[in-house]
Amino acid sequence: MAAYVDMESAQFENVNAIRKFPFADDAVLVDREGRELPSDAIVDLHMFVPADFPNPQQMSAEDLPVVRMTSLHLSESMVSACFVSEYGGKTSAASVTVSADGFMPYFPYRLRPLAGTQDMGGVVSFGDVFSGFGGMDISGLPKTYFFDDARIHPCQVICAKPAGLRGFVDPRTGEKVSGNVEIVFSGYVNASRDGDSVGLELAEGGDVELASECAKATGADVCGATPIVSINGIRPDANGNIVLWFH
């Protein structure tokens, strides 16, 4: 095979330059102008996309998100590619742009989510596109390929349900924290951890020290609030509780 003419030992990415991988076997790698994408343009790809499977035990291959490459741009100064994921009626997108000055073939470049997309990413490796390796025609640059069915092989895509908690917001100041955040409690709260569970316990005397001014005050109409004395003639117990039963 031609791929072995100029190399003593063919590496993983070199072999990928002569086959359709990482695209699906039945993917259509012909753009909207009828130009076929050279097999050495994209030689490796690994992606993570968000998905939430209600019944993972009953899912099939048809239930997995569909990931496609929508465009590939090549000029004398840069190469870029864009990938989209479609799942549950929602489309997510991620792309990468690499300058020709620092370009390295067969190197994993990080994909970054586009505006409006969360929890999608991955790495992509290009062939030696700037030297015209294999079938990549660098004449007539710049050129942009737009694809409708350049589907990625399912084995190159992993998916999972995104984390529900994104951060903590202070409603008083609007300050927001996310990522690795250290949570510190006051001296009256004792925190403990048992495996994945976290327990909080109020220290002795903490209920008095941490109580608000209104809670400490006594008398009628305290802090502007009108206390409930009774409901339909029913008064609270010794602890100030009135239990309501709904039938």
Image (cartoon, helix red, strand yellow):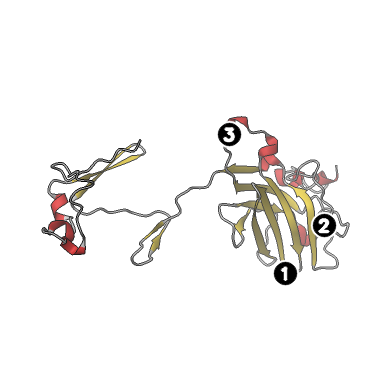
Q: What element does badge 3 sit on?
A: loop
Residue 222 or residue 195, whichever sits in front? 222
Residue ID at (85%, 42%): 1
Q: Amino acid at mark 1?
A: Ser
- Pointer 3: residues within 10 angstroms few (<14), some, or many (20+)? few
Q: What element does badge 1 sit on?
A: loop
Name the quadrant of the C terminus: top left
Q: Is residue 176 above or below residue 238?
A: below
Q: Find residue 77 and name its label.
A: 1
Residue 147 or residue 58, whichever sits in front? 58
Q: Is residue 96 above or below residue 238?
A: below
Labels 3 and 2: the sequence-earlier one: 3
Residue 187 or residue 91, whichever sits in front? 91
Specify the quadrant of the image occupied by residue 218.
Answer: bottom left
Q: Find residue 136 and name its label.
A: 2
Spatial distance from mark 1 to mark 3, Cα to Cα? 47 Å
- Pointer 2: residues within 10 angstroms few (<14), some, or many (20+)? some
- Determine whether, in the image, residue 223 is placed left or right of residue 104: left
- Cβ–Cβ below 8 Å for labels 1 and 3? no
Residue 236 or residue 152, whichever sits in front? 236
Labels 1 and 3: the sequence-earlier one: 3
- Determine whether, in the image, residue 34 is placed left or right of residue 67: right
Give how far across and how far down residue 24 sits, in percent: 76, 42
- Determine whether, in the image, residue 116 is placed left or right of residue 37: left
Spatial distance from mark 3 to mark 2, Cα to Cα? 44 Å
* Numbered label tally: 3
Residue ID at (84%, 53%): 30
Labels 1 and 2: the sequence-earlier one: 1
Q: Amino acid at mark 2?
A: Met
Q: Find residue 55 and name its label.
A: 3
Residue ID at (82%, 50%): 29
Give how far across and how far down residue 225 sits, in percent: 21, 61
